[in-house]
Image: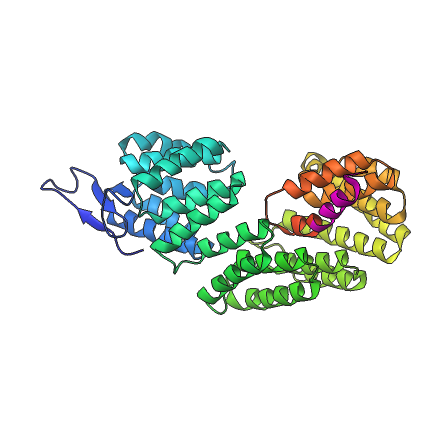
């Protein structure tokens, strides 16, 4: 963004809030920021630029500095809310709601839209951002949120139009390009998605490792049944991740787990096992600020999951089940804290039972897995077909196809779910 202009009347700065205008300063076309602090304004602009450039650490730092410079800046608390999870962000939502009456008209409507967005009231959020886009036709932030709301509602063509409007204001920032790619991915326009993701990669530093554009390309390959190329891109991402320091010391175990997962589901169980084991070796032996003792235990559990599933694919069912029993004991020993992992255990147990041919037991376990996860749904659909429950398999497959979050679970599930629907819909 270009720097903001600051209009101050004859009164002193201590007497009134300084009205700061993003970009060119035309109040009727772009969002007006109301703050008495030039530092808050500067950090706000830096935060937005960092967010739009996939620099999430810099975004968090700039958001914190914005609020530190002016704790009564409503839009600053909006930034802080975006850096936090649902449970932690509420105090900032409450704060910007309390401060909104003192903000400009545009800010008030923007904050209103964000409040609805965080409450998953997408229709009301859409109404707010549509109104803002007419009120402020040159404000890029407005179009980005308008696109996000449309995307979450499944209005993919409208989302693309909003993100393209953001690019017409400033095409140098990569996030909108990546989001357009996400929409094309959901529309099964994989070449168009790749084109946009590659443009994002071209716009960032050669050592940068933005998740969205790299994994978007990986998912496009998985949708088209091209695991080798997907793994090549994942290796490039791993190289960048190891070089650039952007991970702030967090080990690449999760990347290796993705490699394991892709290899496993495309019939390369031995290579999958190797990837899971290499990945866990990257977890530091002693607890750190990045990986504490609880996280270490979680990653150990994930290693056990990967090992067991890989062994089951190889045909070592007894060895795999012993690992599953060990995972169950870990959860039991975890007491109340461990209860959250029961769905993951039932996913593992169901996976193993399905591989060993005990489809009835697989169904019982998988019904207790996380059925918000499309891959868990796919396993239950497979098991349901095995026990003759075509209606259940069709229902689950239709839910998978409607799932609109781009992730590896959808990429691994969607093609098979479509086949199940095609093969069984008329029977």
Q: Position of residue 332 (x, y in %)?
A: 77, 38
Residue 8 is a magenta residue: no
Compared to residue 211, the image places residue 29 above or below, namely above
In this picture, residue 368 sits left or right of residue 68: right
Q: Residue at x 70, y 62 (%)?
A: 227
183 vs 334, nearest the viewer: 183
Choose top left, top right, bottom left or bottom right for residue 191: bottom right
| Magenta highlight: main SS | helix
Q: Position of residue 272 (x, y in %)?
A: 76, 61
Compared to residue 6, the image places residue 263 above or below, namely below
Residue 416 is a magenta residue: yes
Q: Position of residue 54 (x, y in %)?
A: 46, 56
In this picture, residue 181 sits left or right of residue 381: left
- For the N terminus, the quadrant is bottom left
Q: Position of residue 182 (x, y in %)?
A: 54, 52
| Viewer can see residue 68 | yes
Q: Residue at x 65, y 60 (%)?
A: 221
Query: In the rendered view, how is the structure colored?
Result: rainbow
| Viewer can see residue 341 | no
The magenta segment is: 415-426
72 vs 19, nearest the viewer: 19
Choose top left, top right, bottom left or bottom right for residue 385: top right
| Residue at the far left in the pictured view | 10
């Amino acid at each position: 963004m270009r720097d903001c202009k600051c209009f101050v009347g004859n009164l002193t700065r201590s007497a009134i809030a300084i009205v700061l205008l993003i970009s060119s300063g035309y109040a009727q076309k772009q969002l007006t920021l109301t703050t008495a602090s030039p530092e808050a304004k500067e950090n706000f602009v830096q935060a937005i630029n960092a967010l739009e450039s996939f620099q999430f650490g810099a975004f968090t730092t700039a958001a914190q500095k914005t609020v530190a410079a002016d704790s009564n800046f409503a839009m600053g608390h909006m930034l802080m809310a975006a850096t936090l999870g649902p449970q932690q962000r509420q105090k900032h939502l409450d704060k910007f709601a309390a401060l909104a009456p003192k903000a400009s008209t545009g800010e008030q409507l923007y904050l209103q839209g964000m409040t609805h967005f965080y409450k998953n009231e997408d229709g009301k959020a859409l109404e707010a951002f549509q109104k803002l886009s007419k009120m402020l036709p040159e404000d890029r932030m407005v179009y980005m949120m308008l696109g996000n709301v449309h995307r979450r509602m499944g209005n993919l063509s409208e989302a693309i139009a909003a993100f393209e409007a953001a690019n017409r204001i400033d095409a140098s920032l990569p996030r909108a390009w990546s989001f357009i790619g996400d929409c094309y991915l959901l529309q099964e326009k994989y070449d168009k998605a790749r084109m946009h993701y590659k443009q994002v990669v071209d716009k960032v530093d050669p050592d940068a490792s933005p998740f969205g554009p790299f994994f978007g390309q990986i998912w496009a390959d998985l949708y088209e049944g091209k695991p080798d190329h997907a793994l090549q891109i994942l290796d490039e991402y791993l190289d960048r991740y190891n070089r650039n320091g952007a991970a702030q010391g967090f080990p690449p175990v999760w990347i290796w787990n993705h490699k394991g997962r892709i290899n496993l589901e495309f019939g390369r169980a031995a290579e999958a096992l190797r990837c899971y084991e290499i990945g866990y070796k990257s977890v530091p032996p002693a607890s750190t600020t990045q990986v504490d003792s609880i996280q270490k235990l979680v990653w150990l559990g994930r290693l056990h999951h990967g090992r067991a599933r890989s062994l089951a694919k190889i045909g070592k069912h007894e060895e795999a089940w012993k690992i599953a029993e060990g995972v169950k004991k870990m959860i039991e020993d975890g007491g109340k804290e461990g209860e959250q992992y029961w769905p993951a255990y039932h996913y593992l147990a169901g996976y193993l039972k399905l591989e060993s041919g005990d489809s009835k037991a697989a169904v019982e376990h998988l019904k207790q897995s996380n059925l918000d996860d499309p891959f868990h749904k796919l396993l239950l659909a497979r098991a349901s077909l095995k026990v003759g429950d075509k209606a259940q398999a069709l229902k689950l497959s239709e839910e998978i196809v409607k799932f609109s979050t781009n992730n590896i679970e959808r990429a691994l599930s969607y093609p098979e779910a479509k086949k199940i629907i095609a093969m069984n819909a008329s029977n």
